[in-house]
Amino acid sequence: MGMAQQHTELTVWIGGAAGDGIASAGESFAKACSRSGYHVFAYNSYQSVIRGGHVCMHIRIGTHKVHTQGDELDYLVALNQDTLQRYGKRVMPGGAVFYNTEKFQAAPAQVGKGVQLIGLPVMELVGNQQMQNTALMGALMQVLGLDPAAIRELVKERFAKKGEEIIKANLNAFDKGMAFASVKAKVGEIRIGKGDGKRRPLAGGNPMVGFGAVAAGCRFYSAYPMTPASSLLHWLVKYAAKAGVLVKQCEDEIAAVNMAIGAGHVGVRAATGTAGGGFALMTEAVGEAGMTETPVVIVEVQRGGPSTGLPTKTEQADLFQLLGASQGEFPRVIFAPRTVAECYDVAIQAFNLSEKYQCPVLITSDLYLAERLETFDGVNITNVPIERGPMVSSSNGNGYRRFLDTPTGVSPRALPGTPGTIYTSATDEHDEDGIVISDVFTNPAIRVKMMSKRMRKMEHILKELPAPTIDGPQDADLTLVSWGSTYQVMLEAMEVLKQEDLKVNVLCLRNIWPFQGEQVAALLNKCKMTMSVEANYTGQIVKLIRMETGISIQHHLRKFDGEPFEPKQVADQARTILKTKPKTSVFASVVSDEGIPADFSPIENPAVGAEAQRQH
Amino acid sequence: MAQVKEYIGKVKPDWCAGCGDFGVLNALQRAIAELDIAPHNVQVVSGIGCSSNLPGFINAYGFHGLHGRSLPVASGAKLGNHDLTVIATGGDGDGYGIGVGHFVHTCRRNIDMTYIVMDNQIYGLTTGQASPTTEKDVRTKSTPEGTIELALSPIALALTCGATYVARGFSGENLHLAQMMKGAIEHKGFAVVDVFSPCVTYNKHNTYPWFRERVYKLEDEKHDTNDFRLAMEKSFEWGARIPIGLFYKVDRPTYEDQEPALRSGKALSKQPLQRNDLASFMEDFL
């Protein structure tokens, strides 16, 4: 038996078919680790189209902050043969593969040298195949040498509603799995040091947007189900009664956004959420909110496009849809939170700005950020700032003008129900009283006055946005540039390259619109070399930066296969740029290796399609 | 009782002289006045079209939104502050054409609000194209040889989708129309009033005289408003005789009555924004 190495991190993949309970097992493992004081990052990659719907959850734990799912595989829990075939050879020496010997056979040739094959005869051990995942978790915890207390606690919580019998049976299966591994398997050679004992929250981007909304006093959320925004709907529904949030599933996204606007009009903090396709349907209403100066928050969780595209995959390709949504010109704000904790902060800021400036605020994330599970140090839950802007709660009966022209463009708002301040909010152009000037009295002077009043808000919103910053050394030789969810993969690449004495830093934009042109230009002008890292085909943030600053990012790394960037892919390309210092612009794109032959034919596989249809 | 003049808006209607919508506006002002609802407690929501200009012409809070989207906005407004009397208004193109999906689902929900459709069987603001209620074979600007599609029956649609107060009025029978609207506003649930509101400019077929020759009041024939099957039958009566009046009325719990977030009875817009219970939500993540 070799000496177990002490690592600062390790990675477990749990793979199988949809319906095998992978997300549930993976979440339990992730939560057990976070409760035991480890940093956790979990990403569930649904291999949706191939072989009857394959799912693989990547869980990386560390004694330090882990920014991404990583690139390596130490321990594999294979719930079917396919998982073993795809990933068996990728398991690192010293690692192990766990499987149920009653489900399929595994041969040593299917894994690399120094990798243990740990097969559990589940039926023989616990007498019930339904306990498979729990038994395998027991074996996994034993081989990893992790304290089983946290996972036992989670078993009790998870099955609390199902009664003592079920809890007992599951704990028994877990113990049997542990006992089996303690006799039949060696202690894993890839071992992680002790965590710091701090119990960190573990969450994904969607729940944190939802939590931020609740913290900001949001009381109305209307939506039409669409992957990957549905988990935001689900989180809010779960807490709706407790939080006093009215959650309304609507007939379509057009209804969803218009209901939120109706609620916003009467003074409720209201939001809607969807993916890119649903947002396309909401487009007209974005301008409606802008023109009627109604606060509304719209969450757009990007997935692979175009059109139906890749429903269960990630991409950052909706930036120009958000920037250009709806005809004409009106104030709007766009945020792209970069971390799970930032989803919370951005949600609060979005509700404040939408009321303070009476305009639509768009929050965009993507499947990768929305559906991951990640530990974070916490968020501010005390004295959350609530800013509504000027409100009129009563009138002396004369001269209230709903759309009064003011130095900031913001007109004091009276809510329906207030005596003496009656007005109509119209999508037609109107004057300061709200009287429509479009049809009969079209008046160029009033039109110019009202357009200027509304658009003036943008310069004041700009002053409220936190300054963009560069992470890492100021004197770096290469700056990685992106927006939103690509943030942490760039941070990790930066850390990897630091080990090689290569100086890289990161400029990742959180505030997209109004664009902080002067500040971004000032940061970029100090950079020696720049490389964009974007999960899309055309380089959307690159275009926006050039449009707003005149600065062209020099080199480009893109990915549009639906899988998130892996840190190694970013580090490798950054290294190449640093070593070769190319005189002309270098463009590269990367693809993830999912163990599928390039010529794989879905038509020849009878199981294909079922899973692809499942999540839309 | 309030005076009708208290409900007259700042803006004079810009409808064509003789437009049926004048009668609808007058009837609505009369209905609200008779019910003595203060103007500031009324929220009128409309879409786009000639008739959707109505919010500007009545002294009440207004929201003049997008074409076809009055019902979702009105629903959001009512769910957001159920202390308001919410009335959605619009035309047949707005409600039965581009917005018909919302109409179907709003009927199912039974939110306590009123929907008044000024049905002129034509697209007026866009100068005379066929609408969903244009009768078959009628020639319009977009159907020079006559419409090919059948006309939709708003009353039948409202009934099958679950509206709990379904009535029809005629702009030329103003007092009767006001009574239909009054009943709709008083009704606790989703009330639909489809109104024959002739377009004197673009619909030369369904004119005032055309309707006067045909309409009769259901009340005059001792119609049983509790009888769903009879209401369905009457909803398809079209030709020599066309019924107006209350087709059907039923009491059913409203959406607001059943919504968990409204159990306290306090309107969402009146709930505090600052919370002190956030730590309890954080537990979910630990």
Image (spheres, coloured by chain):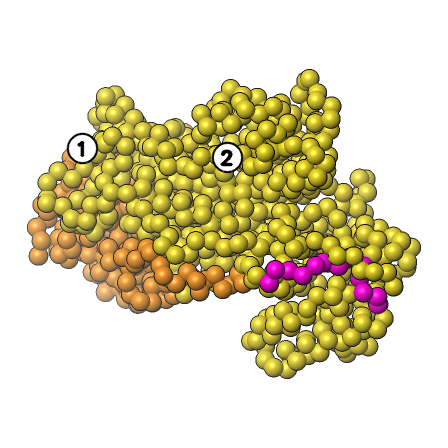
Residue closest to the eye, A121 or A567: A567
**Mark 2, residue position:** A469
* Residue A399: percent from left, percent from top: 13, 38
How far is disc 2 from disc 1 in space, using C-alphas?
A: 63 Å
**Is residue A18 visible from the viewing direction of this image?**
yes
What's the magenta bit mostly, secondary-structure-wise? Answer: loop
Judged left or right of residue B94, residue A168 is right
SS of the residue under disc 1: loop
From this viewpoint, which residue is outermost toward the top? A583
Name the residue type under label 2.
Thr
Taking the spot 57% from the left edge, 75% from the top edge, the residue there is: A160
Judging from the image, what is the letter of the chain drawn in orange? B
Residue closest to the eye, A601 or B119: A601
**Magenta extent:** A185-197
The answer for which chain carries disc 2 is: A
How crowded is the residue under tag 2: few (<14 C-alpha within 10 Å), some, or many (20+)? some
Taking the spot 45% from the left edge, 48% from the top edge, the residue there is: A345
Name the residue type under label 1.
Ala
* Residue A46: percent from left, percent from top: 68, 51
| Residues flagged by tags 2 and 1 on a common chain | no
**Mark 1, residue position:** B17
Judging from the image, what is the letter of the chain drawn in yellow? A
The answer for which chain carries disc 1 is: B
**Is residue A281 visible from the viewing direction of this image?**
no
SS of the residue under disc 2: loop
- The part of the image, by quadrant, that contains residue A494 is top right
